[in-house]
Image (spheres, coloured by chain):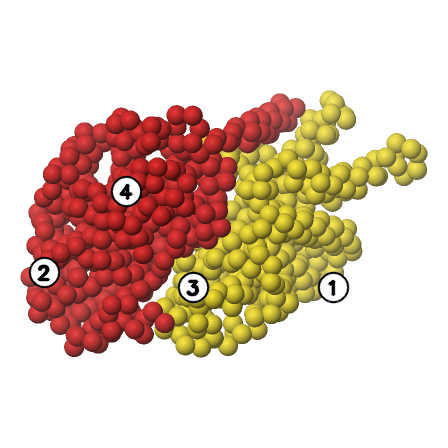
Chain colours: A yellow, B red
Amino acid sequence: MTTTAPALLTRLRGPLTFLALIAAALLLLPLLLEPFRLNLFAQYLCYAIVALGISLAWGRGGMLTLGHGVFFGLGAYAMGMHLTLASTAADPLNTTGLPQFMVWSGLTELPWFWKPFTHPATAIAAAVLVPGAAAALLGWSVFRQRVRGAYFAILNQALAAAFVIFLIGQQHLTGGTNGLTNFPVFAGHSLYSPTAQTTLYTITVLTLAAIYLLFRHVNNSRYGKLLIAIRDAEDRVRYLGYNPTWAKTLAYALSAMAAGIGGALFVPIMGIISPSLIGVIPSIMMVLAVAIGGRYSLAGAATGAVLINAAETTFAETFASGWIYLQGALFVLVIALAPHGLAGLTRQAATALTRPRTRTTPPAPQDTTTGSPA
Amino acid sequence: MARTRRGALTAATTALLLLTTACGGATTDGTDGDTVTVGMLHSLSGTMAISEVTVRDSVQLAIDEINADGGVLGHQIEPVIEDGASDEATFAERAEKLLQSDDAVTVFGGWTSASRKAMLPVFERNNGLLWYPVQYEGLEASDNIVYTGATTNQQIIPALDYLREQGHTSLYLVGSDYVFPRTANQIINAYAQAHDMEITAEEYTPLGHTEYSTITNDIARTEPDAVFNTLNGDSNVSFFQQLRSAGVTPDDTPVLSVSIAEEEVEGIGADNIAGHLTAWNYYQSTQTDANTGFVEAFTDTYGADRVTSDPMQSAYNAVYLWKAAVEEADSFEVDDVRAALDGITIDAPEGTITLDGDTQHVIKTARIGQINDDGLIDEIWTSPEPITPDPYLTGYDWAADLTG
């Protein structure tokens, strides 16, 4: 490649678009959107963080993970437990020092695994490390047995179902179906003030950007190439002398950690975490968002998550009683007409525009990391 | 090429649709000109829709009646309808939208405890006012919620008193696995301990569970005096069918249910459940002038095949109670309306009801009913007088351990 001016511009197009998007998100949106809308947008971004993880595990590593709600939930509950304890401590009417649901369930002492969550630092660390460790353990044990494809997807799904049943059944420890809610304070600051909401939004945007850059780096590294090889021909990689188990486990754990971070940010923004947000259906929705955005592209996956959630809100507000059909129709349309998602669609359009009539079919997305963010 | 163009067209259409609808949400002031905006927030999709749509219908009926009668303080009520989608987080999100974007002066909504718990912080931090229409597990008080359904001492405790009066001293507990049945059963256990009653079993199944033969055979085998049923939703259909197949009749072992009203009896099938008992504060058959009018208006509007139930009636009352409080306060402001709540009295379908300002619950009569062959419910026992709400059961010594 020669370094002519147009070529340089082409090379810089990606980073410039990226910086422009962050600047717009940080400077423009808080001015344009009323606080409620900004808060909603921050929620979508949390799902975008999860989507980045799914794109890494599924798009890159070929692991169809239909149970990412579990990792999202582990991160969310870690944060939710801390916020619950902080709110309990700040409540002058509560003399027991226990969250209300524990009092009603007949507990007189805080369960041992709740105690570390008194400190915000433990909660934040747990929100990243617990999902990572859980995924590493699960990944290592099943990838070693060469469990993959549909079997891996079903296993994930079962995990999500089991996790929800555990949360609901252990009401005295987890808050049951109601989940954890009502968090007015975090580390001595009110979470209800407009500044707190803007701060949370800023943190979410920056976290999303950081994880995007990290995963992009992972994708472009030799390890990223190895993941593609494993995705496309695992047995051949094995013959070549690589051990796919650790490579897949690492990608799966990274993906789970992203989901945990997304969950931990989601809780103070949304103000609630409950089993219905992390079960089988939410897990499928997370994967669906990535499918719609384009699983081979990190930017596509993140955009998909934002668009799907925005579409859900918009449809639900406009057609209170029939929105769910519209949402379903949107899914069917996108998957039927654009199997590589919106990111694949932009790529096709770009190809068609720059090289009209030389190709009748777009190239298969062998390596999609070099594309600009959609 | 054709393929690409079609794909691009779809994307463009989708984007356009998103943009146009996203910009469509213009905000209106709570009391703009001749209208006043209120929110209606129920599940119109998902598993709870079948129940919550009936409640939305009765809130809409009350609003239409009030509007036809001149509105509230000269303002026509303009409802903004949102879908809670049977999902707690959606309830919280939509509640926030109603209070912040739509400036709703009050919101009628919720059914499940989980949805109420999720909305509570939203209403507290925005100082909104939520009217919650369903009987619930108590142990809650918020300045920003008015509870127009029964709390435990207006439904569960009278039901236990009734069973004890009838000489039923051994109870089998079966419930769905969530907060209401679990809390209800804790109260029942404490009550039983204090009154020398025996709890033979306490079984929980997940919401939506349909396989009850183990439990129904267990009931047939152990022959408890009565079953206290806190199952919710369509699980009841399977439970009562399988109970009947197991040979358990209402004469041997009556089942007293606290979540089955006229609407649910239809789904279960009257022949499967006739003879069993329910505990509520209102039945379609309740004999008051207001109820005659309510049932007539409801069936005229929505069809002669529709039934009325306790939650529907409580939701209908909520609108009239709110109207009366607004008129008493001469203001739509939440703080003014709240200050006016105490002592507001209306002639409701369930009889004369009064708001208790301390708890923001309704003083109401408890009624035990027996399901008849037509699928309606006949009153067989009524509390001697309206019961003052006691959500924390402070008036009951045996409940001291429950409330912490």
Residue B358, x across and y down, in percent: 32, 56
Label 1 near label 3: C-beta < 8 Å? no
Question: What chain is tagged by disc 4?
Answer: B
Task: Between residue A218 and residue B283, name the one nearer to us.
Answer: B283
Name the residue type under label 1.
Answer: Gly
Location of residue B90 in the rendering, given as x and y in whole percent from the top left corner:
45, 46
> Residue at 44% across / 77% down in the picture?
A109
Q: Which residue is mark 2?
A: B249
Q: Position of residue B179 (x, y in %)?
A: 35, 61
Asked if badge 4 and badge 3 are on a common chain, one would say no
State which tag comes first along the sequence, 3 or 1: 3
Residue at mark 3: chain: A
- Reading the image, the residue beneath label 3 is A175
Q: Is residue A311 above or below residue A254?
A: above
Q: Please state which amino acid type lies under the numbered disc 3.
A: Gly
**Residue at which label 4 appears:** B321
Q: CA distance from mark 3 to mark 1?
A: 49 Å
Q: Which residue is mark 1?
A: A241
Task: Determine whether the residue tagged by mark 2 lies in a helix, strand or loop.
Answer: loop
Pick whichever, B389 or A83, lies toward us.
B389
Mark-to-mark CA distance, 1 and 2: 70 Å
Closer to the camera, B386 or A237?
Answer: B386
Left/right of residue B247 with respect to residue B360 in the rendered view = left
Which amino acid is tagged 2?
Answer: Thr
